[in-house]
Image: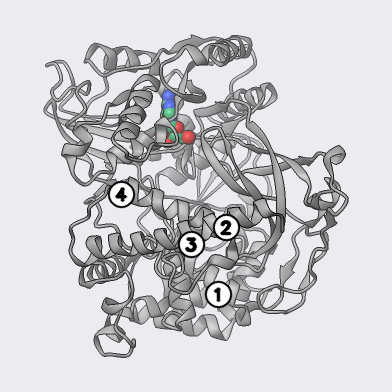
Amino acid sequence: MTTHDMLAKLDAQVRHAELVRDIKAHDEKYYQDDAPEISDAEYDKLRKELEHIEAEFPELITKDSPTQSVGAAPSKGFKKVQHAVPMLSLSNVFSEEDVDDFLTRIRKFLGLSESDAVDIVAEPKIDGLSCSLRYENRKLVLAATRGDGAEGEDITANVMTIDEIPKTLPDDAPDILEVRGEIYMSRKDFKALNEAQEEAGKPVFANPRNAAAGSVRQLDSTVTANRPIRFFGYALGQVSESFADSHYKIREKLSAWGIPETTFQLCASKDDIMQHYQDILENRADLDYEIDGVVYKVNRLDYQERLGFVSRAPRWATAHKFPAEQAITKLNAIDIQVGRTGALTPVARLEPITVGGVVVSNATLHNEDEIERKDIHIGDTVVIQRAGDVIPQVVEALKDKRPKDAQKFEFPHTCPVCGSAAIREGDDVVRRCTGGLICDAQAVERLKHFVSRLAFDIEGLGSKIIELFWEKEILKTPADIFRLKDKNDDGEIEPPLQTWEGWGEKSVANLFDAIEERRTVDFNRFIYALGIRQVGEATAKRLAATYTNLPTLKSAMKDAQDHENSAFEDLLNIEDIGPAVAEDLIAFFAETHNEEVLSDLENLLAIKPYDAPQASDSPVSGKTVVFTGTLVTMTRAEAKARAESLGAKVAGSVSKKTDYVVAGADAGSKLKKAKDLEVEVLSEDDWNSLVNS
Ligand code: IVH
C-alpha cells in the first residue's frame, strides 16, 4: 500500500464512523420519534456515501453499519389508486432497421400493403416520470403515478401545486377525461434548484429526472410547491366520449384545453420519420428539457384500437432511443450472482463513474462466453455503456491499457453460494447451479421475486429486508410472509421486530399492513409470483385465463404428467406454451416441496379467479376459439389479439373443449375435426357479428 492509499483509507475510516453515527441518529428521529430532521433526499445521500465507502473499502463494513441492518424501511407512502385504463409502457427501437420492422409489423398485423399509408406522429420522449391526470366534469380530481400500470399512487396534493397544469377545463371537454403525460423539471430550473440547494448546504440532485421524482414523492406537498416541476401531456386514459379520430387531433385538442405540450410532427414514411429523428437528435441540446428518444405513434385511432397491445406496451407505438452513452473506467473484480432459477451471472465491479448523470459501479457481463469473446480480464480498463433504464453493460476491454498483473477470469463450475455443481445444459449459454432447493441464493431470489412489483408487490419488503429475514431464519418460504405478524405477536421472533435496530412500532405496523393488503391476490399474479422457469407475466396470464383457479391448475398439471392425454394437449394448446415450458410447469407442480408451499399458501391467501380484461359482457368471454383457413377482414394475428382482448382463449388445435371454430376459406383438417367432434363452426362473418354484438 502506498502512503497515498493509506491516507485515503484513514480518511475513509473517519468518515465511515461519522456516517454510521449520523445515519443511526436520523433513523431514530424518523422511525421512533416520527420527527425527521433532514429530507428524504438528504438522508439518501448519506446512505449512498456510506455505501460508496464500503464498496471501496469492504474491510470497513462493521456489523452495526446501517447497511447491514435494514435497508429502506417501509415508506409511509401514498394512497394507492386503480387506473381506470392501464398505464402502458413502450417498446424500444434503436436503429433504422428496427424502425422499418416496426412499420412492417404494423402493416402485416392490419393486413395493409406497402402502398397503404400509415401515418405516424413523432414526438420527443421526455425523461421524467409518467403521471395520469383525471378530470371529472372538467375539474382536476385525481393525479396518479404509473406504478405497475394497473395501480399507481395518489399524488393529487402534490400535482395541485404545479401551476401550469389546468385545474379546470373549458366547456367543450368531455365529462370524464384522463390525460397521460410526463412530470419533469426544465434544465434551467434544475440548475437553479441545485445552486440553491448547494448554497443552503443541502444535497444536490444527480439529474433533472431525479429532482422531479424527488419533488413529486414528497409526502409534504408544501415542499413540492416550492419545487419548479412541470408537465407535458401526450396521451389519453379513460374518456367518456371520443372527440378525435387521430392522435394528431387529440394533441391539438389537449393544447386548446390548456394542457402543456411538446412539439409533435406528422410523418408519412420511414424516410420522413428518420429525418425527423435526426433533427430532434441534433437539436436536443437546444431544448430546455431532457429527452432520451423520439416516440412514434400510429396516427389513426381506429388503427390503434385494432392493433391493441402486447403485455404492457402498445403495438401502435414505440420509442426510438438515442444512442447509449459510454464511459471508460476500471474493472476491479468480477462477482458471480446466482439468480432465482440458478443462473450464474457474472457482474463487473467497477471503479464508480458517472454515465449520463447516473453513477455506475456495476455492469453486467452477461455470461461466460461473453467474457471469453470480449477477452475481458480483471484489472482491465473497460468501456461501459448505459442506454436509458437498461442495465449498464461492459462493451469492451482496452487491450493496450491492460496492466501486467491483469488476471484472466476463471468461470466457476460450482455454485459460489451452495457449492453444488454448476452446469450448462445442451447449447444453453447460461451455467446453472444444480442445488435447487438447497441453494440459499435461489431460495432468497425466489422470495424477492415473490414480493416484487408484478407479483405480490409488497411495499416495504425490499431485497435487503428479505435477505435479513432469511439470514435470521424468519422467512424460509413465501408462506412465512403471511405468518410473520402472528409469529411476531406470539413471541416466536426473538427479540420482536419492533425492537430491531432501525425499526419501531410504526414501521413494523406499516409492513404488516402492506402484507395484509396483499392477502387477497389475483390468480395471474399468484402464478407469476411462483417464479416457475420460463413463466413470465404474459404466460402467467394465459395460464390463469385457461385454468381460472389454483385447484384446477394443480390437477391439470398432475394429469399432464402423463404426456399422452388431453391435459397435456390442452397445455400445449395454450398460446406461447411449447414443450419446454410445459415440462418446466409439470416439473414444478410435481415437486413435493412445491406442493407443500402451494397448499400452505392456499390456506393463507384468498386467490381471486382470473378476471379477463373487459371481458364480462362479451359473448365470447371465457370461450375457447380456434381460427383456421384464410381470413379476409383481418389477419390471423389481429383476429387472435381481438379475441383475447375480449376474454376468449385462442387455441392452436381443435378438441372437445373448443367452443368455436372460425373457418375461413380453404379450411382443412381442423374444420373436419370440428365437424367430427360436433364443435360449433362459424364463418368469419358470423364471428364478426358475434364479437361486435
Ligand atoms: S406514450 C400508450 N409518449 O416513456 C403509450 N410516453 O418508456 C404510453 N414517455 O411510460 C406512453 N415521453 O412515461 C409516451 N411522448 C411520449 C413520452 C412517453 C416520455 C415515457 C412514459 C412511458 C415511458 C416508456
**Real-space Cα separation, disc 1 to disc 3, in angstroms:** 16 Å
Task: Please rate how many residues cluster around mark 1, counting C-alpha atoms within 10 Å: few if below 14, some from 14 to 19, many from 20.
Answer: many
Q: Answer whether residue 10 is visible to the viewer in this image.
A: yes
**Real-space Cα separation, disc 1 to disc 2, in angstroms:** 25 Å
Indicate which label's residue lies in the foreground, 4 or 3. 4
Q: Amino acid at mark 1?
A: Ala
Task: Please rate how many residues cluster around mark 4, counting C-alpha atoms within 10 Å: few if below 14, some from 14 to 19, many from 20.
Answer: some
Which residue bears the numbered disc 4?
40
Task: Please rate how many residues cluster around mark 3, counting C-alpha atoms within 10 Å: few if below 14, some from 14 to 19, many from 20.
Answer: many
Indicate which label's residue lies in the foreground, 1 or 3. 1
Q: Amino acid at mark 4?
A: Asp
Question: Which of the marked residues, 2 or 4, is nearer the chain's N terminus?
Answer: 4
Q: Residue at x 59, y 80 (%)?
A: 590
Which residue bears the numbered disc 3?
528
Residue 55's tag is: 2
Label 2 C-beta lies within 8 Å of the nearest ligand 1 atom: no
**Real-space Cα separation, disc 3 to disc 2, in angstroms:** 34 Å
356 on left or right of 210: right
Residue 443's tag is: 1
Q: Amino acid at mark 3?
A: Tyr
Relative to the observer, which residue lies in front, 80 or 626? 80
Question: Which of the marked residues, 1 or 4, is nearer the chain's N terminus?
Answer: 4
